Amino acid sequence: MNKQEFTVRNAEPDEFKEVGKLMVRVYSQLEGFPKETEQPDYYEMLLKIGDFTKKPKTELLVAVSSKGQIAGGVVYFNDMQYYGSGGTATKEKNASGFRLLAVDPSARGCGIGKLLTNKYINKARNQNNAQVIIHTTKAMLVAWKMYENLGFKRSEDLDFIQENFRFLDLGYCLNR
């Protein structure tokens, strides 16, 4: 995708499958991240990314180009009890979170990750949540600098080891 305008909005139900395929494509290409054969349940969850929207106060946001192409997506949780992670994050009050941020490889460098991140930061503020919680892994180093530049700080108390995954999920928090 070349440089063009992108908008962020809630995904339509008929787009869920496309977003799921994008998630699988992105996560399966991350160096050091478990592959589909190693974590079939995880990748099945990615394919069915729209199922998250069945949870209260949960949205699937997409970045869409001016030509109607989905360039990225993320799941936003306005209530951490629905976040579904390990560790203590689901017990956080007055907090929002996001999971599963993915940007189409052809749209990298267009600011999609930052656009999606700013959208849910603004959503959290508009919903009067005092903090935004995210988790990332060493396989996602490219995103760390962006998060830190947007004000996220490491919160080691939110770290956890995913069941059956061989890496640590690192907690980050904004406005803690």
Image (tube, grey):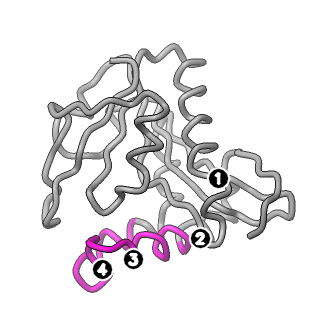
**Residue at label 4?**
35
Q: Are marks 4 and 3 in contact (CB under 8 Å)?
A: yes
- Where does residue 176 sit, x and y in percent of width and height? 32, 18
User: What is the three-letter code of the residue carrying label 1?
Assistant: Val
Which of the labelled discs sits on residue 17, or is there none?
Answer: 2
Which of the labelled discs sits on residue 28, or is there none?
Answer: 3
| CA separation in Å, label 1 and label 2 | 12 Å
Which is more foreground, mark 2 or mark 3? 3
Q: Secondary structure at mark 4?
A: loop
Provide the residue span drawn in magenta.
21-45
**Which corner quadrant of the image does residue 105 belong to?**
bottom right
- Mark 3 nearby-residue class (10 Å; few <14, some 14–19, many ≥20): some
- Where does residue 14 sit, x and y in percent of width and height? 70, 65
- Where does residue 168 sit, x and y in percent of width and height? 16, 53
Q: Earlier in the sequence, mark 2 or mark 4?
A: 2
- Mark 2 nearby-residue class (10 Å; few <14, some 14–19, many ≥20): some
Q: Which is nearer the eye, 113 or 20?
A: 113
Q: Earlier in the sequence, mark 1 or mark 3?
A: 3
- Where does residue 133 sit, x and y in percent of width and height? 36, 33
